[in-house]
Amino acid sequence: MTIPFILDTDTAQDDCVAIIASLLDPEADLRAITMVAGNVGFDRQVRNAQMTLSAAGRLGSVPIHLGCRRPLVLPWVSAENVHGDGSGGLDMDFTGTATEQEHGVDALIRLTAEAPGEISVVAIGPLTNIAMAAVKEPAFVDNVKRLVIMGGSNNGRGNITPAGEFNFYVDPHAAHVVFEAGFRDVTVVPWAPLTLNDAVFSREQLAGIDAIGTPLSRFFLTVCGPTLAFDESVGIPGTTHPDSLSVGILLHPELVTQAGDYHVAVEADSGLTRGYSAMSWGVHGLEPNARVVETADGEAFHRWIEGLLATPTEVSRPLRGGLFD
Ligand code: RIB
Ligand code: CA
């Protein structure tokens, strides 16, 4: 029985890997991609998603709905210093590529309302679309089967600031709305310590991916290259992959080796701690509103991604740049 879900993404680098996993894993029934303002320029994110679909030989096979182009309250903040433009310098002919007329927020509401309690959502960017859907249509909160959120840190360091992880930092008001909304089943995949411990691919592991020699392994290395340089410059020994881990946790819950019930609240008003996720582990009299993943099987996660990248694909359209030149 496959798992139906919607992927809400700010497509760059690790989001691209999450899309590949969402397309190719045999358990995955990817119903739609909804785009949200985050990593890089919005229209660039759309092209990054289309190139990813093309690399998997699946261009046009999944509807892409354009969602919110800026956070709810604060101005957009980019992560272009981390990802470049998220494409690793790749390009392709986008003539005739299309996105859906229906807004991403409306698609989230409609698709989950058409099958109440059956479709999950994996949110791997700022939570603007998810919050807007919950505000526009309160029934959305009950219609979503499971909400998997990549964001925050579990009493750990941020990344864009000492306190803030990027997705929650960009739109802390949306994160506040989502955690207060009452979704029935929320799983949080945090940056620290989880991602830093269990979802970093080392140079040695990247060399193993290079040896695979498929279009997907070349695509992976091309889009993740710029982020490797940044990550190493800030002391992270490899490329970080919290987004594909979030998809993996939905499709293969056995990847989770330790998790706990927490009350999660996100700071939206402080400049210093904007986006900080206060995760209470049950001793502060706060009702849990999420299951937070504490540890994952990093080796199994890496094997899973390697296996997907080994899938032979015929690219939908020729890709230029990076390892495709
Ligand atoms: O902090 C990590 C998150 O921010 C990931 O989703 C990455 O893609 C960026 O959006
Ligand atoms: Ca992301």
Image (cartoon, grey):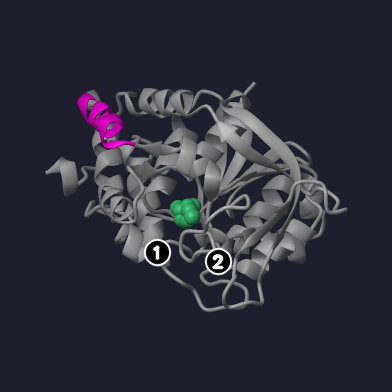
Q: Is residue 61 magenta?
A: no
Query: Which mark is drawn over residue 318?
Result: none
Q: Position of residue 165 (x, y in %)?
A: 53, 59
Q: Residue at x 22, y 55 (%)?
A: 89
Considering the numbered disc 1 on the image, is that residue within a helix, a strand or a loop? loop
- Is residue 206 rendered to the left or right of residue 155? left
Report if the beta carbon of the residue with label 1 is closer than 8 angstroms to ligand 1. Answer: yes
Q: Residue at x 76, y 65 (%)?
A: 135
The residue that mark 2 highlights is 169
Mark 2 surroundings: few (<14), some (14-19) or many (≥20) residues within 10 A: many
Task: Identify the magenta region.
Answer: 202-211
- Is residue 143 rendered to the left or right of residue 170? right
Three-letter code, disc 1? Ala
Q: Position of residue 298 (x, y in %)?
A: 47, 29
* Residue 137 seen: yes
Three-letter code, disc 2? Tyr
Prevailing secondary structure of the magenta residues: helix
* Residue 101 seen: no
Q: Is residue 210 magenta?
A: yes
Q: CA distance from mark 1 to mark 2?
A: 11 Å
Considering the numbered disc 2 on the image, is that residue within a helix, a strand or a loop? helix
171 or 98, which is in the foreground?
Answer: 171
Quarter occupied by the C terminus: top left
238, above or below 36, in the image: above
Mark 1 surroundings: few (<14), some (14-19) or many (≥20) residues within 10 A: some
Q: Residue at x 63, y 34 (%)?
A: 4
181 or 196, which is in the foreground?
Answer: 196
- Is residue 82 rendered to the left or right of residue 273? left
- Point out the residue furthest to the front here: 283
| Residue 213 sits in quarter | top left
The residue that mark 1 highlights is 79
Report if the beta carbon of the residue with label 2 is closer than 8 angstroms to ligand 1. Answer: no
